[in-house]
């Protein structure tokens, strides 16, 4: 099997590789201000390193937020802190392995989210969920009214937790609570608490389900990219899950011929042994004919996705008695290029599922 690049702690990927891994559509989907996207393009074209260019943009947004707080404009401050967090999210993505620089940038990202959290109404809550001798992190967002359900939203190899704040906005507006999860191998769960992808992944996300059910009567899972696999396997193992959305995930993951994918997979598992990574992928894979999804399932697919093909998602559909497939023929991976339509569609779908499951409905 192909060897894995050494975790030297630095990003030496050419700028065009970084732009392929983090295209404009993805940046907008994860909340980067469009003016910052344009500035990022100019800076990287001028030879400024990806992480430094994004960090400078975040610094400007943080200054804007602090000025708004001083002037008594909390709404503006809230938006600016979120914009800064999005810039820092992409700054740390320049580094696949857990270098000091990546940790520092991710801490700054978390701090910016925390400052926005304090200004939210209701304020967002930082969650620490015990698991496997450590802690898994999440952000809990509650609607202003009693929630009809709670959706746990998470990513795969590089987009984690508060990266999905725009999706949380849509769910909150429809009366749902949201748990933005950092699971095994993700975010601070990995960077600070060293919970890697070698644990019982189904049990890990079931721990998030338990937390969601403590604040709402029903729990749903929305997994993006490889996180969609975790969502499907958890729904198959945990009958408390009321609805599950799989967004562009392979049922049986394999190492991809892309350096970014390989390095990120190595960091999540904590090993540079390619065979060990594939063995772990096999361990956490969806099991056709064995795993059954008893709750409503929504599968999203992009026809232009270079990473996941539709036949790789078919096992999820075959395993559910109530399955819906939505395809965007020109859709990129996780449907970045139709973000507003995708997010509204999924949020409406979860609201419909929770409403239909209310007593007396």
Image (spheres, helix red, strand yellow):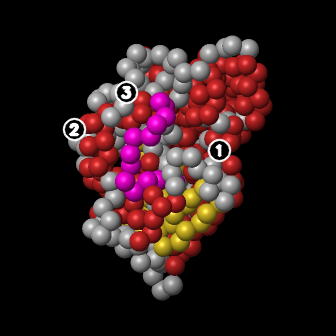
The residue at 26%/49% (across/down) is: 283
Q: Judge from the rendering whether residue 235 lies leftward or rightward of residue 348; answer left or right.
A: left
N-term-proximal mark, 1 vs 2: 1
The residue at 72%/31% (across/down) is: 37
SS type, badge 2 = loop
Check contact, mark 1 vs mark 3: CB within 8 A: no
What span is colored magenta in the figure?
248-260
Residue 352, horizontal then vertical, whole percent: 56, 73
80 over 338 or under it: above or below: above
Q: Judge from the rendering whether residue 94 lies leftward or rightward of residue 64; answer left or right.
A: left
The residue at 63%/52% (across/down) is: 304
SS type, badge 1 = helix
Q: Tell me, for residue 133, which label it has, or none.
A: 2
188 over 59 or under it: above or below: below
On the image, numbered disc 1 is attached to which residue? Answer: 29
On the image, numbered disc 3 is attached to which residue? Answer: 4
Q: Identify the image quadrant of residue 295.
A: bottom left
Residue 152, horizontal then vertical, whole percent: 45, 54
Residue most extreme to the bottom? 360
Q: Badge 1: few (under 14), some or many (20 or more) residues near its Cα, within 10 Å?
A: many
145 over 124 or under it: above or below: below
Residue 91, horizontal then vertical, whole percent: 57, 25
């Amino acid at each position: 099997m192909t060897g894995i690049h050494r975790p030297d702690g630095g990003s030496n990927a050419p700028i065009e590789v970084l732009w392929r891994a983090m295209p404009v559509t993805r940046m907008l989907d994860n909340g980067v201000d469009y003016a910052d996207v344009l500035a990022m393009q100019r800076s990287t074209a001028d030879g400024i390193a990806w992480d430094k260019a994004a960090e400078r943009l975040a610094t400007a947004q943080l200054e804007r937020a602090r000025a708004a707080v001083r002037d008594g404009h909390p709404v503006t401050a809230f938006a600016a802190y979120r914009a800064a967090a999005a810039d820092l999210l992409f700054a740390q993505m320049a580094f696949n392995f857990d270098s000091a620089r990546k940790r520092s940038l991710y801490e700054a990202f978390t701090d910016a989210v925390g400052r926005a959290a304090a200004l939210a109404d209701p304020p967002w809550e930082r969650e620490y969920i015990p698991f496997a001798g450590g802690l898994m992190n999440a952000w809990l967002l509650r609607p202003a009214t009693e929630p009809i359900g709670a959706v746990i939203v998470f990513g795969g190899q590089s987009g984690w937790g508060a990266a999905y704040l725009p999706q949380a906005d849509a769910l909150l507006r429809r009366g749902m609570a949201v748990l933005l999860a950092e699971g095994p191998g993700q975010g601070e769960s990995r960077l600070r608490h060293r919970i890697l992808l070698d644990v019982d992944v189904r049990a890990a996300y079931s721990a998030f389900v338990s937390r969601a059910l403590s604040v709402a009567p029903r729990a749903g899972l929305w997994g993006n990219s490889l996180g969609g696999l975790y969502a499907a396997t958890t729904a198959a193992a945990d009958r408390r899950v009321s609805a599950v959305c799989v967004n562009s995930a392979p049922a049986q993951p394999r190492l991809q011929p892309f350096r970014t994918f390989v390095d990120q997979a190595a960091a999540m598992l904590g090993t540079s042994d390619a065979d060990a990574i594939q063995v772990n992928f096999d361990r956490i894979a969806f099991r056709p004919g064995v795993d059954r999804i008893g709750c409503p399932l929504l599968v999203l697919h992009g026809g232009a996705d270079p990473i996941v093909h539709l036949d790789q998602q078919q096992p999820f559909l075959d395993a559910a008695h109530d399955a819906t497939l939505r395809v965007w023929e020109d859709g990129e991976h996780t449907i970045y290029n139709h973000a507003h339509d995708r997010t509204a569609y999924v949020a409406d779908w979860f609201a419909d599922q929770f409403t239909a499951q209310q007593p007396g409905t």
